[in-house]
Image (cartoon, rainbow, N blue to C red):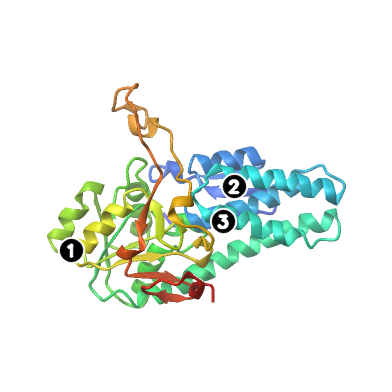
């Protein structure tokens, strides 16, 4: 199967947001349309669309969708409707900073409109521009990151930071794709990423689409494969990067510590939009997921229904374990001065 579209895009004919439903992969490839804000918010919460850059596009398209559907006939009323939509979108996944960034970018653009029609036109065009830029940004990020990989490397990654986490190409997997495009032979070890198995379901599927060799392991096996000398580099994406920590899918911190112990470089690949220049780890709200994600696998119960569950979506990896951060503006190494990343 060849991926026939971007992960998420604006459908001009139906004036709706079109996306690949990632909850169905790899069993089924289905494209769905969200023609109202409630459907889009449900898609974000349920991880039909997920991944920091893809959420930025979802946020931007959400404002475009809200502008399209609003019955307001004055600028004041329409902007008020859009602010309500913005708050609703940002609340769906509080840890992922790109979602709010995408929302605010389009909100900032529409503030320069002169009339109601202008607000709607600008919202759509700015959201589409944001999505187009994401592809270019990830390609640039991939070009920089490819220089960190050697021919013959085996790279361990966690969760999914590929094209399904972006509009296209990917961040961590984008680095791998760019290295392969440069003629390097790269093998990948993908951690399953419990409890929703984004690594097993999506990362392996993506890489197999591109004929990039990939081996699936359980999350608890990463220390074993590092100890056995099976891993040369670790590359992950990020959902938020503060002055002192990288927030990514829970389990990332464990891989970072193991990589440090085994003297394996641990890299983070993320666009500048993922950086939170205002906050520190202690100020960031970690999203808590539904307890049934751990009590069930699909429809099969695997734990007592009344067992207490702790199910954070993300963890924080201190900067001391990060050997480099790969962005579209270049590769940054410790000591990390986030202001340098902006330019």
Classify residue 147 by image quadrant. bottom left
147 relative to 49, above or below: below
Mark 1: give few (<14), some (14-19) or many (20+) Cα within 10 Å: some
- SS of the residue under disc 2: helix
- SS of the residue under disc 3: helix
Which is more foreground, mark 2 or mark 3? Answer: 2
Quadrant of the image containing the N terminus: bottom left
Q: CA distance from mark 3 to mark 1?
A: 35 Å
Classify residue 253 by image quadrant. bottom left
Q: Position of residue 250 (x, y in %)?
A: 35, 48
* Rendered residue at 52%/45% (across/down): 93
Residue 294 as seen in the image, left or right of residue 79? left
Where does label 3 land, which residue?
56
Q: Position of residue 313 (x, y in %)?
A: 41, 44
Residue 7: tell me if it is visible. no
Q: Position of residue 314 (x, y in %)?
A: 40, 48
Where does label 2 land, which residue?
90
Question: Do tag 1 and tag 2 residues touch (Cβ < 8 Å)?
Answer: no
Residue 110: give its label. Answer: none
Q: CA distance from mark 1 to mark 2?
A: 39 Å
Mark 2: give few (<14), some (14-19) or many (20+) Cα within 10 Å: many
Where does label 1 land, which residue?
262
Q: CA distance from mark 2 to mark 3?
A: 10 Å
* Rendered residue at 32%/43% (across/down): 194
- The one nearer the camera, 200 or 63, is 63
- The one nearer the camera, 169 or 102, is 102
Residue 165: tell me if it is visible. yes
The tag earlier along the polypeptide, 1 or 2, is 2
- The one nearer the camera, 336 or 186, is 336
- How many numbered tags mark residues here? 3
């Amino acid at each position: 199967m060849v991926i026939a579209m971007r992960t998420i895009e604006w459908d001009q004919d139906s004036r709706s947001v079109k996306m690949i439903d990632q909850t169905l992969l790899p069993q089924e490839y289905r494209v769905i349309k969200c023609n109202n804000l409630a459907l889009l918010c449900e898609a974000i919460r349920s991880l039909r669309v997920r991944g920091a850059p893809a959420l930025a596009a979802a946020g931007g398209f959400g404002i475009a969708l809200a502008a399209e559907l609003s019955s307001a006939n004055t600028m004041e009323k329409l902007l008020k409707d859009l602010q309500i939509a913005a708050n609703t979108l940002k609340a769906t996944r509080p840890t992922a900073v790109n979602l709010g960034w995408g929302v605010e970018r389009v909100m900032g653009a529409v503030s320069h409109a002169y009339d109601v029609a202008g607000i709607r036109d600008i919202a759509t065009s700015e959201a589409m521009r944001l999505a187009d830029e994401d592809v270019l940004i990830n390609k640039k990020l991939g070009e920089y990151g490819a220089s960190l990989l050697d021919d013959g490397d085996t790279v361990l990654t966690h969760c999914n930071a590929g094209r399904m986490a972006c509009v296209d190409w990917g961040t961590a997997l984008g680095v791998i794709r760019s290295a392969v495009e440069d003629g390097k032979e790269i093998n990948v070890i993908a951690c399953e990423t419990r409890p929703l198995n984004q690594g097993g379901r999506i990362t392996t599927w993506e890489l197999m689409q591109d004929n990039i060799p990939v081996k699936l392991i359980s999350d608890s096996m990463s220390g074993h494969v590092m100890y056995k000398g099976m891993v040369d580099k670790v590359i992950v994406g990020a959902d938020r990067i503060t002055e002192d920590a990288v927030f990514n899918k829970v389990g990332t911190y464990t891989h970072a510590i193991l990589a440090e112990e085994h003297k394996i470089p641990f890299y983070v690949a993320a666009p500048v939009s993922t950086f939170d220049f205002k906050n520190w780890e202690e100020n960031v709200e970690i999203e808590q997921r539904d307890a049934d994600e751990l009590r069930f696998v699909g429809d099969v119960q695997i734990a007592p229904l009344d067992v207490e569950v702790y199910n954070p979506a993300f963890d924080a990896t201190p900067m001391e374990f990060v050997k480099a951060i790969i962005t579209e503006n270049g590769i940054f190494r410790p000591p990390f001065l986030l202001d340098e990343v902006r330019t």
